[in-house]
Image: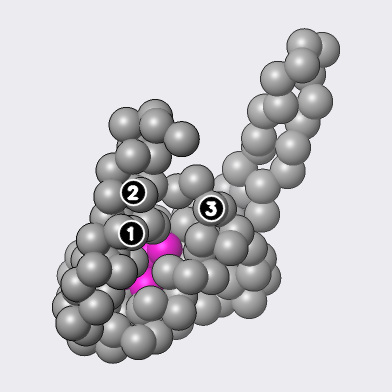
Amino acid sequence: MVTEVQPTSDRIMSRLDPNIECALRDAQNCKMAGDYQLALNLYNKIIENDPSNARALLHKANVLDLMGNYSDAIRCYSSALECDPHNAEVWYNKGMTLRKTGRHEEGLEHIRKGISLAMGDL
């Protein structure tokens, strides 16, 4: 969970929850080691405690994609976009997964949106 802190200026700063950061790191390590099921379990625990954690949703979708579970990955990417509609990586990755399912034009639109966001275009 991220908590917002309002400093004296108009900027909003976020304080990261170290427990979630450690769980994300552990899940990523499991993914990199090829233990996809354990990575999914860890991401699910994070999402259970913080359903709007776009990073956990993104990484869970990436694991599902690696496992070839494209329909669940696409749903998970969509959930991540509901939480963070300006996340370039989610748009791009969802586009790549859509293309794997034969939805080439829709995938290309998502990829372009991701690139546009990454380049700072709105």
Quarter of the view holding residue 34: bottom left
In magenta segment, residue 83: no
Q: Residue at x 24, y 78 (%)?
A: 103
Task: Please state which of residues 58 and 104 is positioned toward the viewer in this rendering.
Answer: 104
| Element class at badge 2 | helix
Side (left or right) of 41 relative to 82: left
Task: Give yes or no for contact between labels 3 and 2 (Cβ–Cβ under 8 Å).
Answer: no
Task: Please state which of residues 24 and 87 is positioned toward the viewer in this rendering.
Answer: 87
Report the residue marked by disc 2.
Answer: 114
- Provide the residue span drawn in magenta: 58-62
Image location (x, y in percent) of residue 18: 58, 48
| Element class at badge 1 | helix
Task: Please state which of residues 109 and 27 is positioned toward the viewer in this rendering.
Answer: 109
Q: Nearer the viewer, mark 1 or mark 3?
A: 1
| Kind of residue indicated by mark 2 | Gly
Q: Mark number for residue 47?
A: none
| Mark closest to the chain's N terminus, 3 or 2 | 3
View extreme (front): residue: 105
Image location (x, y in percent) of residue 21: 50, 52
View extreme (top): residue: 9
Magenta stretch secondary structure, dominant:
helix
Q: Mark number for residue 110?
A: 1
Q: Quadrant of the N terminus?
A: bottom right
